[in-house]
Image (cartoon, grey):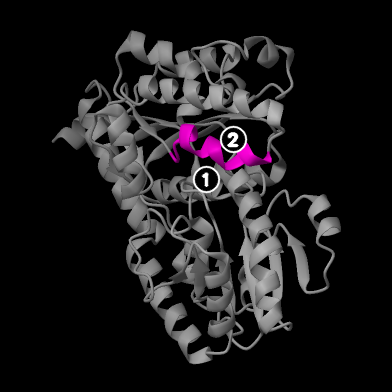
Amino acid sequence: MRILWTLPYLPWPTTCGSKTRQYHLLRAQAQRGHRITLLVQSKVPLSDAARDALEPMLERLIVIPRRAVHSPLNLLASPILDYPMRAIINGLAPCLRHRFEQLLDEPWDVIQIEHSYSFQPFEQALQTRGLPYMLTEHTLESVMGAACNDRLPLWLRPLNAFDRWRYRRWEQRVLRQPSELVAVSGHDAALIGQISGRQVNVVVNGVDCAHYQCVQPALHSQRLLFVGNFEYGANLEALEWALEEILPQVWMSNPAVRLAIAGHALPASFKLHWNDPRIEWVGYRPDLRELQRRCAVFLAPLRYAGGSKVKILEAMAAGIPVITTSKGVSGLAANRGEHYLSSDDSGQLALQITQLLSQPARMAQLGEAGRQFARQHHDWSVAAQQLESVHMRLAQLAPATAPARVALAK
């Protein structure tokens, strides 16, 4: 199949769950023989490393620069009722719209749009031409806007509430238009279905299980591991909660416990604020396996739903026992007590950490169960098969002019 795939970011390096998802699904579909044109609007220039990682998978890679967040156009457009701020930042892009319209002159089996916030430059052309397409929504932004609300100055919170209201209107408008809708979990599919009134497909988030199968965690190390993309407000809030409330209670019982913190865009101010030798500020690591081998437990105290959960799946695939919250595993069909431990109370989380670190046999049991769960339900091959099923339905709706469509119809 010929696939036109759009993204509002370059999927390399894989600094967050969304980029990891895109990279692995692109790779999986390319390995299945599909010919992909990737149209990207990026806030960063295309590096040689990104080009080398992406171009071998693609028929074409087209990168359009995105204007800066603080562009005067974004500021002037910010009061517009029709668009939430994130849609403004990633939209109102004539060069992107024009290039997309040019590409629509070619025959496509599949047109794939990622994220409702990237949709604005494509909306008019898709409506005018009446072409079938799919849209994947990774998380409901109108809900996730609450994750950063408490971090904002008081004068900005009403503006944040206003933008969340705009985003709900935008979601209601956008999510009713595609031929096929895709969510990353059953939980998200149900929420999107309520907004759109549509049936929603699920293409799960995944993990490269083979990449992590040789990892054996250091169950006697007393080291916890926290991983996240710190451009994402929910991860910042989770880390602050861990450092302010959870870890101090752990240290009262076991002062030998260490916490390694890894991830993209880790704020330098955090290291100054929590200046404790038991905290290891690791930063971004393109390959987590060596760090995983030095840790005993993966800690993910997320208090806001949404997000990709890819880092939790990576920990499970590496055999590291996971301690999290109900929000941390929302959307994963894993069983509490069998595949992970959880609580939404800081004291209970601290107690679970302390008790589990003294039970290496229990840690090994949880780690192996998590590894099996990831392998059976969330390997990228599972997600790729789910995505290909959506692609095949779309290809049957597309104008039957290309040889690929005729062969597929037969």
The reply to whether residue 242 is in sight is yes
Q: Residue furthest toward the left?
A: 410
Judging by the rendered image, the residue that carries numbered circle 1 is 18
Q: Position of residue 325 (x, y in %)?
A: 48, 62
Q: Where is the C terminus found, in terms of image quarters?
A: top left
Nearer the observer: mark 1 or 2; the answer is 1
Q: Nearer the viewer, residue 110 or 337?
A: 337
Count how many numbered circles sit on residues in the image. Answer: 2
What amino acid is found at the position of numbered circle 1 in the picture? Ser
- Residue at (41% x, 57% y) in the render: 380
Residue ID at (62%, 60%)? 227
User: In this rendering, would 88 be left or right of 120?
Assistant: right
Tell whether 362 sits left or right of 278.
Answer: left
Q: Quick one: 229 or 55, which is closer to the camera? A: 229
Residue range in magenta is 138-151
Q: Is residue 401 left or right of residue 321?
A: left
The local crowd at label 1, few if under 14, some if 14 to 19, many if 20 or more residues have their Cα within 10 Å, is: some
Looking at the rendered structure, the kind of residue marked 2 is Tyr
Q: Label 2 crowding class (10 Å Cα cut-off): few <14, some 14-19, many 20+?
A: many
Residues at marks 1 and 2, CA–CA distance in whole angstroms: 10 Å
Q: Residue at x 57, y 65 (%)?
A: 346
Q: In what element is the residue under mark 2?
A: loop
What residue would you read off at disc 2?
9
Q: Are marks 1 and 2 in contact (CB under 8 Å)?
A: yes
